Image (tube, grey):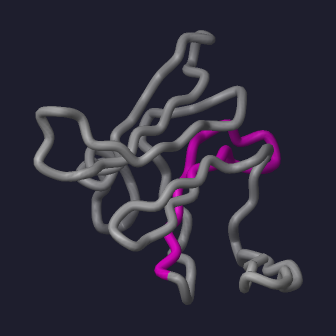
Amino acid sequence: MTFNGAEWSGHIILPDHGSLGGPGLAVLDDKLYCVHRGHAGDTQLWYATCDGTSWTKDTKLPAHKSGNTPGLISYRDKNADRSQLLCVHQGFDDRAAWQAAEEAERAQAPDGRPA
């Protein structure tokens, strides 16, 4: 759904994007990032981006599973030269875990498998 300042649009179904829970959303470099758990018993974390027109295919965050909805923020730490995304979620053994979006994208092979 989108809001034009006066009213909300109808629901928009994202094809081939399923989830066991709500998503974590954040904006970075004019893209909306969506991180979510898989569907049908899949606790793997996945992400997709939207450029304002269309969504990318889901991509696995390598070696990250979660029992709950992930949190996602865009931030710049005092030593960084640009903004980045940080995803925080319930890890494998109920400990908090995190993944920077840049690390996830570097860790992906062209076919979407972990490199």
Residue 63: quarter of image: top left
Residue farthest toward the front in the current orientation of the protein:
6
Residue at 47 percent across and 38 percent down: it is 87
Q: Compared with residue 30, is residue 64 higher up or lower down, i.e. above or below?
A: above
Residue at 81 percent across and 84 percent down: it is 6
Instruction: Pick the residue in front: 43 or 100.
Output: 100
Q: Is residue 1 left or right of residue 77?
A: right
Q: Compared with residue 30, is residue 93 higher up or lower down, i.e. above or below?
A: above
Q: Is residue 57 left or right of residue 36?
A: left
Residue at 12 percent across and 33 percent down: it is 79
Residue farthest toward the bottom in the current orientation of the protein:
53
Q: Position of residue 107 (x, y in %)?
A: 27, 48
Q: Is residue 81 left or right of residue 69?
A: left
Inspect the magenta stretch and tell me whether residue 45 lies in it: yes
Q: Which residues are magenta?
A: 35-51
Instruction: Pick the residue in front: 74 or 98.
Output: 74
Q: Position of residue 18 (x, y in %)?
A: 75, 59
Q: Position of residue 64 (x, y in %)?
A: 49, 33
Inspect the magenta stretch and tell me whether residue 10 lies in it: no
Residue 14: quarter of image: bottom right
Q: Quadrant of the N terminus?
A: bottom right
Q: Compared with residue 79, is residue 109 higher up or lower down, i.e. above or below?
A: below
Residue at 86 percent across and 78 percent down: it is 11
Q: Position of residue 19 (x, y in %)?
A: 75, 52
Instruction: Pick the residue in front: 58 or 34.
Output: 34
